Image (spheres, rainbow, N blue to C red):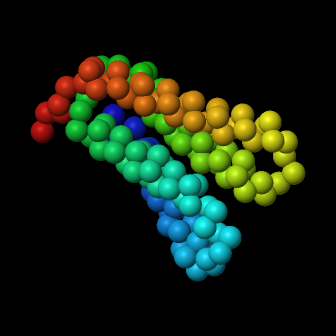
């Protein structure tokens, strides 16, 4: 599961960089950029913090349910990406995309992320501490 931990760690790092860049942009430009606060917060919480915590989880615990673990990780990665990108599309409207599409993208990502949290809950009952 070290490869799964590394995968989550790399995506956490990517979200951390995006969140830090967005925060710097908001601080530097002030004014209208503060409309990005909810997006910035979600990028850092569900992208960076959550994926990082799950990365540590897979280093500390082991499970026999590898497919469930990979499903959990990928739904978390795709869900975090979908939620935050969808939120950006829905709130900022940078492109001429229908409101229905952006709303479904936003809600779809959030729903997938919610599924990932549910899978994580299940996995917490199916693990044992890793032997050191």
Q: In the visual, does 91 lie left or right of 132? A: right
Front-lying residue, 129 or 100:
100
Residue at 41% over, 24% down? 119
Occupied quadrant, residue 129: top left
Q: How far across and down, in percent of the image, does residue 72 sit?
A: 45, 29
The residue at 50%/30% (across/down) is: 114
Taking 68 as reference, is 127 left or right? Answer: left
Evaluate whether residue 70 shows in this view. no
Q: Position of residue 11 (x, y in %)?
A: 48, 49
Query: Quarter holding the C terminus?
Result: top left
Residue 34 to residue 67: above or below: below
Instruction: Give x and y (percent) for residue 38.
Output: 56, 55
Query: Image quarter for residue 82?
Result: top right
Question: Does residue 124 lie above or below 19 as drawn?
Answer: above
Quadrant in which the N terminus is drawn: top left
Task: Give the mark count.
Answer: 0
Q: Which residue: 40% across, 38% down?
A: 4
Is 122 above or below relative to 55?
Answer: above
In-front residue for pair 16/34: 34
Q: Nearer the viewer, residue 94 or 32?
A: 32
| Picture quadrant where residue 104 is located | top right
Is residue 125 visible in this depiction of the protein?
yes
Question: Above or below — where is 101 with respect to 72?
Answer: below
The residue at 67%/45% (across/down) is 86
- Return the x and y of residue 130 as percentages of the image width and height: 18, 33
| Most foreground residue, 58 or 124 | 124
Q: Residue furthest bottom?
A: 28
């Amino acid at each position: 599961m070290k490869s799964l931990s590394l995968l989550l760690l790399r995506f956490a790092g990517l979200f951390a960089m995006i969140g830090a860049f967005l925060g710097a942009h908001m601080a530097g430009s002030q004014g209208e950029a503060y409309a990005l606060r909810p997006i910035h917060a979600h990028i850092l919480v569900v992208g960076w913090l959550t994926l990082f915590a799950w990365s540590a989880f897979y280093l500390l615990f082991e499970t026999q349910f590898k497919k469930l673990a990979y499903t959990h990780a990928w739904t978390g990665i795709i869900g975090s990406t979908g939620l935050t990108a969808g939120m950006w599309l829905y709130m900022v409207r940078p492109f001429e995309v229908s409101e229905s599409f952006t709303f479904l993208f936003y809600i779809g990502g959030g729903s997938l992320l919610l599924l990932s949290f549910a899978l994580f809950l299940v996995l917490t009952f199916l693990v044992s501490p890793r032997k050191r």
